[in-house]
Image: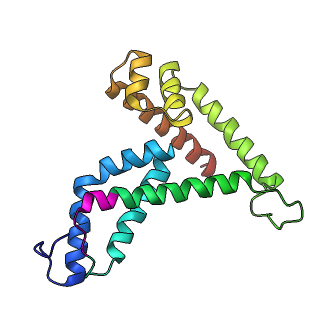
């Protein structure tokens, strides 16, 4: 990043540079990270960490190629994230550990089971296309384009069906929580 970019104060200059990088490269950066991490949420989190690291850099730090720096820092953070996943996945289970906050208690299990039952009932009340589009998007995690292709509908119609299903589920939940 060179010193010719706008910004009144040194900190403001750095922030303006990071904002410009974000606007120009964030979609590509998130796609790059998503491919590495196989998770949109993790990709967005790591991308945010990269921008925060850039903001924290000393103003005297000269970066010749901001885009290359951005992607290299993101790649390094992605490697760290993957290592942490592996550590967690291979960590030995200590039966004496105080992990009550991780282990679901019976009430939580019962509540989750009840919520699942209510969701299934709500979906059963919907037209089949609406229910199917909702399940494919929310539960299976599929994007609107692939659902549209499978269901032989437009993406707009898939969004319509998913929106209707969400509205129905919310309305049903609200009725159950606030019986009048």
Query: Which residue occupies the extreme top position in the image?
Result: 152
Pinpoint residue 32: horizontal percent, then vertical percent.
38, 46
Q: What residue sits 26% from the left and 53% below the top?
A: 25
The verdict on residue 2 being magenta is no
- Which residue is outermost to the bottom? 9
Compared to residue 16, the image places residue 175 above or below, namely: above
Point 62% across, 53% down: residue: 85
Count of picture labels: 0
Q: Which residue lies most toward the right here?
A: 96
> Could you say which quadrant of the image residue 47 lies in?
bottom left
Above or below, 54 against 104 in this view is: below
Q: In this view, does 179 lie to the left or right of 97?
A: left
> Could you say where residue 155 lies in the image, as x and y percent from the top left?
34, 26
Picture coordinates of residue 114 (x, y %)?
72, 42
Indicate the quadrant containing the N terminus: top left, top right, bottom left or bottom right.
bottom left
- In this rendered view, identify the residue nearer to me: 16 or 178: 16
Q: How are the colours assigned in the image?
A: rainbow
Is residue 127 found left or right of 155 in the rendered image? right
- Identify whether 168 is placed above or below 79: above
Residue 127 shown left or right of residue 27 in the figure:
right
Query: Is residue 156 visible in the rendered structure shown here?
Result: yes
Q: Is residue 69 magenta?
A: yes
Find residue 127 and report its horizontal and vertical position in percent.
51, 21
Which span is picked out in magenta?
62-70
Q: Can residue 39 be seen in this view?
A: no
Nearer the observer, 9 or 117: 9
């Amino acid at each position: 990043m060179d010193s010719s970019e706008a910004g009144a104060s040194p900190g403001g200059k750095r922030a303006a540079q990071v904002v410009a990088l974000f606007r120009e490269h964030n979609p590509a950066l998130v796609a790059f990270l998503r491919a590495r991490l196989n998770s949109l949420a993790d990709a967005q989190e790591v991308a945010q960490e990269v921008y925060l690291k850039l903001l924290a850099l000393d103003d005297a730090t000269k970066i010749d190629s901001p885009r290359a720096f951005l992607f290299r820092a993101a790649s390094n953070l992605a490697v760290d994230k993957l290592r942490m996943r592996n550590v967690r996945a291979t960590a030995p289970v200590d039966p004496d550990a105080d992990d009550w906050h991780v282990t679901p208690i019976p009430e939580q299990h019962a509540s989750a089971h009840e919520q699942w039952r209510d969701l299934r009932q709500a979906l059963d009340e919907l037209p089949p296309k609406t229910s199917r589009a909702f399940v494919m998007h929310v539960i299976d995690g599929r994007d609107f384009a692939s659902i549209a292709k499978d269901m032989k509908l437009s993406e707009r119609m898939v969004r319509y069906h998913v929106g209707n299903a969400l509205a129905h589920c919310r309305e049903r939940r609200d009725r159950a929580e606030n019986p009048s």
